[in-house]
C-alpha cells in the first residue's frame, strides 16, 4: 500500500460535507513550502499544495487557516484540462491520520 506523509499549513478553514450515505467528510488543503539556497546565495521557495479529504467526525473545528499539521494517507494524482484548455494536475490525499502541530494565532 502506498502512503504519503505531508507536513504543512492549512490554506483556509476546513469544510465539512455530508456524503449520500450520511458519512461526514472534512475537506481542507495543506501547503508544504521548501526553502533552499542557490549557488549565488539567493533563497528560493517552492510550495506544493495538497487537497485533502478526511472521513470522520470532530476534527473540523481544529483545522483552521494557518494551523500546522502532519497528515498521513494515500496519494492520488488527478490530471485534467481547465477552462483555458491547459493541462492541470491536482494532488489529492485521502487522509488516514492528522496530527495537529500547532494552532493558528488569533488576530487581535
Image: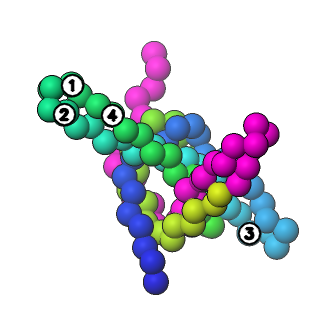
What x and y, as percent, mark residue 44?
29, 31
Left or right position of 101 against 19? left
Instruction: Name above or below for residue 54 compared with residue 21.
Output: above
What x and y, as percent, mark residue 21?
82, 73
Instruction: Name above or below for residue 68 compared with residue 96.
Output: above
Q: CA distance from mark 4 to mark 3?
A: 38 Å
> Is the C terminus in the top left, top right, bottom left or bottom right quadrant?
top left
Left or right position of 25 against 58? right
Q: Secondary structure at mark 4?
A: strand
State the residue position of label 3.
Answer: 23
Marks 2 and 3: CB-CB under 8 Å? no
Mark 4 or mark 2, earlier in chain: 2
Q: CA distance from mark 4 to mark 2?
A: 9 Å
Q: Secondary structure at mark 2?
A: strand
Mark 4 or mark 3, earlier in chain: 3
Choose mark 2 or mark 3, whichever is in front: 2
What x and y, as percent, mark residue 106?
45, 26
96 drawn magenta: yes
Q: CA distance from mark 3 to mark 1?
A: 48 Å
Choose mark 4 or mark 3, whichever is in front: 4
Q: CA distance from mark 4 to mark 1?
A: 10 Å
What numbered label is drawn on residue 37?
Answer: 2
State the residue position of label 1.
Answer: 42
> What span is colored magenta in the figure?
80-108
Amino acid at each position: 500500500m502506498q502512503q504519503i506523509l505531508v507536513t504543512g499549513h492549512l490554506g483556509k478553514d476546513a469544510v465539512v460535507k455530508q456524503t449520500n450515505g450520511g458519512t461526514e467528510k472534512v475537506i481542507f488543503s495543506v501547503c508544504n513550502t521548501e526553502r533552499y539556497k542557490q549557488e549565488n546565495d539567493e533563497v528560493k521557495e517552492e510550495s506544493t499544495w495538497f487537497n485533502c479529504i478526511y472521513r470522520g467526525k470532530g476534527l473540523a473545528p481544529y483545522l483552521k487557516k494557518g494551523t500546522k499539521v502532519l497528515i498521513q494517507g494515500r496519494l492520488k494524482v488527478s490530471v485534467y484540462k481547465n477552462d483555458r484548455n491547459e493541462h492541470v494536475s491536482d494532488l489529492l490525499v485521502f487522509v488516514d491520520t492528522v496530527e495537529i502541530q500547532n494552532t493558528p494565532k488569533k488576530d487581535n
